[in-house]
Amino acid sequence: MMKLSKILLTFTLLLLLISCSTTKRKLIPTANKGGYLLNLNTNLNLSEKNITGRVFDIKTNALLGGIELTVGCKKTQTNTNGEFSFKLKEFSNGALFIKASGIGYKIVETDFINMKNKNILNIDFYLAEDDRPFINCQ
């Protein structure tokens, strides 16, 4: 009886450990102490690339409004809920990168993202505060 309970306890702990490690998503780090999470998908009914996501403060996890996002020559800003979206026509090589920047935060740039045969990208950015002093430009 004692041996069976030890086996059951070991099995339960192992199962708990495995389930916890598979549900965590790992933040892709960048040089500016921030990072991003991405998820690529395909929807056969879409003829354009759809990019959506949110921008967070990395320390407080607060959603950030007014952050500028750049994909190639296209720019947009997050709304007051920290959300953004792009719709892009087909492009030649299928790879792109995205830059997120805002006053008071360090810039986060993704690595090149291969969107070949994919047309839906959901990406969340996590920005670190910029602790450098502002310069009074006149």
Image (tube, helix red, strand yellow):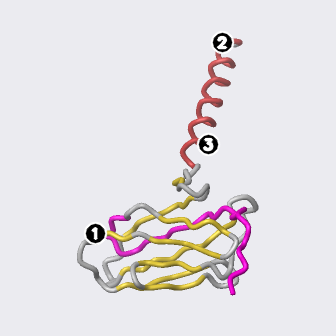
- Residue visible at 67% across and 76% down in the picture: 103
Task: Provide residue 24's location: percent of width, then percent of height.
Answer: 58, 49
Position of residue 79 in the picture relative to residue 35 (left or right): right
81 within the magenta span: no
Task: Provide residue 43's location: percent of width, then percent of height.
Answer: 36, 76
Q: Which residues are magenta?
A: 113-138
Q: What is the C-alpha distance between the residues marked 1 and 3? A: 32 Å
The three-letter amino acid code for the residue at tag 3 is: Cys
Viewer-closest of 75 and 115: 75
N-terminal of the pair, mark 1 or mark 2, is 2
N-terminal of the pair, mark 1 or mark 3, is 3
Question: Dot 2: few (<14), some (14–19), or many (≥20) neighbours within 10 Å?
Answer: few
Residue beneath disc 1: 116
* Residue 3, disc: 2
Badge nearest the viewer, 1 or 3: 1
Task: Provide residue 60's location: percent of width, then percent of height.
Answer: 76, 62
Position of residue 77 in the picture relative to residue 118 (left or right): right
Please report contact status of discs 1 and 2: CB closer than 8 Å, yes or no: no
Position of residue 48 in the picture relative to residue 15 (left or right): left
Please report contact status of discs 1 and 3: CB closer than 8 Å, yes or no: no
Task: Work out which quarter of the rendered image holds the N terminus and state it.
Answer: top right
Vertical position of residue 30 compared to residue 97: above or below = above
Residue beneath disc 3: 20
Viewer-closest of 21 and 116: 116
Vertical position of residue 37 compared to residue 77: above or below = above
Label 1: which secondary element: loop
Task: Provide residue 134's location: percent of width, then percent of height.
Answer: 72, 72
In the image, farthest residue toward the right: 60
Label 3: which secondary element: helix
